Amino acid sequence: MTTTERAAVFAEPTRAVPGRWIAFFALAWLGVWMAQLTPIQLLLPLQIQARLDTENWLENVVAFGIISGIAGLCAIVAYPLTGALSDRTTSRFGRRRPWIAAGAVIFGIGLVVLGAQTTLVGIGIVWSIVLIGFCMLTAALTATISDQVPVGQRGYVSGWLSAPQAIGTILGILLITLLFTDQMLQSVIGQLLANLILAVLLMVLVVPFLLLPDAVLAPELRERMTLRRIVEGFWISPRAYPDFGWTLLGRILVNFGNAFGTTLLLYFLEFGLKLDDAQDGLLVLTLIYMVFVVLAALGTGRWSDRLGRRKAFVFVASALQGVAALLLAFVPAFGVAMVAAAILGLGYGCFLSVDQALATQVLPDPTTRGKDLGIMNIATAVPQAIAPLLGAFVVVAVAGFTGLFVMAAVFAFAGALAVARVKGVR
């Protein structure tokens, strides 16, 4: 491989992606988030509750946490591995598209099979397969930002990765709750049909992005791939690449903080605030949270592009989440919770878009973008997977809901401090 050939293949993109590309990118993420977050927020807990057949909320949360934790371990391997494989793929369809398509198929089929499971073991195994498909799809889809989007447009484009997360959660939950009753969703046929709907929507919304062009890597330009090289690539030295290390640490801390503050919110409303209708309260808080996530993700992403700055946005976004958590901890009232939901959404929406753009600017090697962003994505998936179990332990065995939200604040503020240590990006 000559220097000129390498530069042409792996150079930073300079041509702005058009509106059509962004629209199809956003549609793909809408399908992804609906298919992943609707099961996490609604279907999977109901399925586990039906199998356990107990009114003890702690047992349900622990079972959910164990299953999510096992799936999270799969994500730790699947994200960087599939990212590394997509970096080296020489298909005539491009490097990323085959993995996006294969991931969507595994993801979708896994969802349908998941709905048919009648044991906790079966649910755990199939949910892990579902998450592997999710990792394959999203590792490749995220890498297209570094491959095709210039630095000055990445905040805005990353906003269209983040905003569909909020929209997809609401749309998915509303769609399923309108079509099915809680009783139906605790039956096998109800779970099967609900997951089938999500799988079909996933496929339909991802296909348009697959029709867009993807750069083809010539076989002679492919880096030699061995098991040892892939395993060694999982470790990126924070001494050699400190900006990558601080960005990764900040993402882990902030996502843990956000997960601690949101995953047990229903139980906080029911057992902490003792609301008569905790589910309606949760819907109100979720709507407020999601509106501010969307506004912040799209607005601050573009703003950071115009200013050419990332760190300040990510620092403030992390700190806002810490403030919201402290409000929940020390002023336990539903009105205050509504204010906290708005602040948390504002902070997390800003963090989702600008931190994603920041991550693409601290990658160690342009030839391994998929693998390195896969490692970054672990910092999002794993906290969401294991936070329910850790949070339940804190609530029951340590310090109640106040302790849970204080811990969420500590993690968020620590994440802000980590991001402040990044030196190579403004």
Image (cartoon, rainbow, N blue to C red):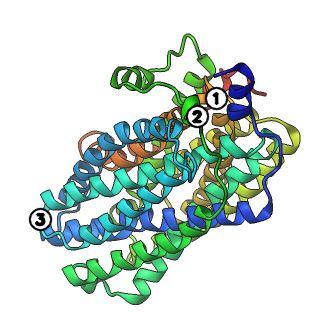
- Tell me the quarter of the image containing the N terminus: top right
Which residue is label 3 attached to? Answer: 119
Marking on residue 366: 1
Q: Is residue 273 visible?
A: no
- Look at the numbered disc 2 and give the secondary structure of its residue: helix
Residue 239 position (above or below residue 155): above
Residue contact at pointers 3 and 2, CB within 8 angstroms: no
Q: Residue sitting at 21 percent across and 65 percent down? A: 48
Residue contact at pointers 2 and 1, CB within 8 angstroms: yes
Q: In this rendering, would 390 be left or right of 359?
A: left
- Look at the numbered disc 1 and give the secondary structure of its residue: helix
In the image shown, does 399 or 224 lie closer to the viewer? 224
Q: Is residue 181 visible?
A: yes
Q: Residue sitting at 68 percent across and 20 percent down? A: 2
Q: Position of residue 380 (x, y in %)?
A: 48, 43
Which residue is label 2 attached to? Answer: 369
Q: Position of residue 160 (x, y in %)?
A: 67, 58
Q: The disc labelled 1 sits on which kind of residue? A: Pro
Q: In this rendering, would 129 be left or right of 353?
A: left
- Tell me the quarter of the image containing the C terminus: top right
Assess disc 1: are there few (<14), some (14-19) or many (≥20) residues with their C-alpha within 10 Å of its C-alpha.
some
Q: In this rendering, would 116 be left or right of 169?
A: left
- Look at the numbered disc 3 and give the secondary structure of its residue: loop
Marking on residue 319: none
Q: Residue sitting at 36 percent across and 70 percent down? A: 42
